[in-house]
Amino acid sequence: MKAVAVFPSSKQVKIIDHPEPSISSATDVKLRMIDVGVCGTDKEIVSFQYGTPPQGSEYLVIGHESLGEVVQTGPGVKTLKKGDLVVMMVRRPCDHPQCVACRVGRQDFCYTGDFTERGIKGRHGFMTEYVVDDEKYMNLVPGNLRDVAVLVEPLTIAQKAIEQLWQVQARLPWACPAEAGKPAQFCHNAVVLGAGPVGLLGAMALGVQGFKTYVYSRTPPPNPRADLCSAIGAQYISSDETSVDEMARKVGRIDLVYEAVGASSLAFDVMRVLGTNGVFIFTGVPGRKAPIEVDTDLLMRDFVLKNQVIYGTVNAGKQAFLEAISDLEEYRRRWPDAVKRLITGRFRIDQAIDLLTGRVGGIKNVVSLQ
């Protein structure tokens, strides 16, 4: 079967003939892949910044944002049947007995670093015609989400981040006051850094959670990303036109920064204007660049005197996938056109290499294998 693979040792990206997998255990499920999203991680892998083939293989089949259709199930499968649509989890647990996170199914918090990830580290990914994996790593998707379900995996980043946000902010009085008989009012301001898929999905998630949301991104409006922000009730601010300090004055107290751009210089500049009791969430991984100057005394002083919290989040557990599926249905109900516009291009597998290595525009591009 066809697959898109990267060969790190020879620095090649090819469409290859990859062996079709078969069911080998009672709880295995075989999927026909429908959609595979392309993200910055995939582009970094095909530029050989990282990406590790499975042991004994010279290549890695890439792709980790997925939607598949069940074509066959093992005799022990209880929750899925032929024809069901599923989104796959990405990370698989390490095998160390002492890793308490992996032993309870929270490999997204793996202590040892010896986890594997489909399409990224040590396991083949989803940009191929068929995939087999265990039922427990698959999440059922309703049929009405078929055209946008490939967005579930990037949405899990925001789901996990917001879950931790509410846990962190339980440390202080933070709930918005509510008056009986009156609609809820915004009382927290959130700034999203970056208007890519992760940023825009994060803006949707924060809006549903009751934040007045601003998206701070480079390109001046009018542009499709700014239009999409307007459609979901977020305010778009161009970093080319508005300095960090000017942005902070427009927003007022910044209670939350959701970083989704992977640019450390911008992130640490914005960290200066994070408000009292505020939370800064990192989701991006910057590439290797020259060091930047940071006023560490100022940041440390603010962390202490303003009771601030900074944390990073990566990958997601089962619950985040289930919540992302549920919330994507809600976004579809609220903003049907905006959700649809997140996916700006669909490409055949024989176009995938140009998509991965070129400069194709748009918000979210997808390789469709159906």
Image (cartoon, rainbow, N blue to C red):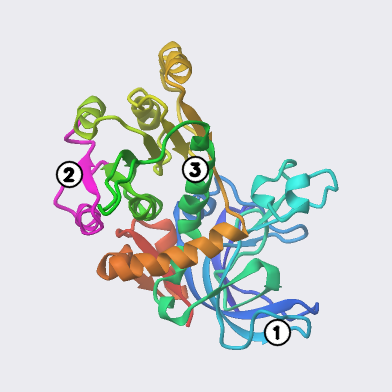
Tell me the crowding category of disc 2: few under 14, some 14 to 19, or many 20 or more residues within 10 angstroms, Cα based.
some
Q: Nearer the viewer, residue 292 or 227?
A: 227
Amino acid residing under circle 1: Thr
Q: Is residue 359 magenta?
A: no
Amino acid residing under circle 3: Trp
Q: At 80% across and 79% down in the image, what residue appears? A: 26
**Split into 4 quadrants, where in the image is the N terminus?**
bottom right
Q: Which residues are magenta?
A: 217-242
Whether residue 186 can be seen here: yes
Tell me the CA gap for discs 1 and 3. Answer: 38 Å
The residue to which callout 1 is attached is: 73
Q: Is residue 233 magenta?
A: yes
Residue furthest right as drawn: 97
x, y (%) of residue 351? 42, 71
Tell me the crowding category of disc 3: few under 14, some 14 to 19, or many 20 or more residues within 10 angstroms, Cα based.
few
x, y (%) of residue 44? 50, 49
x, y (%) of residue 33? 54, 77
Q: At 57% across and 73% down in the image, what residue appears? A: 128
Residue depth check, mark 1 versus mark 2: number of the one nearer the observer: 1
Q: How many marks?
A: 3
Residue depth check, mark 1 versus mark 3: number of the one nearer the observer: 3
Q: Earlier in the sequence, mark 1 or mark 3?
A: 1
Circles 1 and 3 in contact, beta carbons < 8 Å:
no
x, y (%) of residue 292? 42, 22
Tell me the CA gap for discs 2 and 3. Answer: 33 Å
Q: Earlier in the sequence, mark 2 or mark 3?
A: 3
Q: At 70% across and 84% down in the image, what residue appears? A: 73
The residue to which callout 2 is attached is: 220
The residue to which callout 3 is attached is: 166
Above or below, 141 relative to 104: below
Amino acid residing under circle 2: Pro
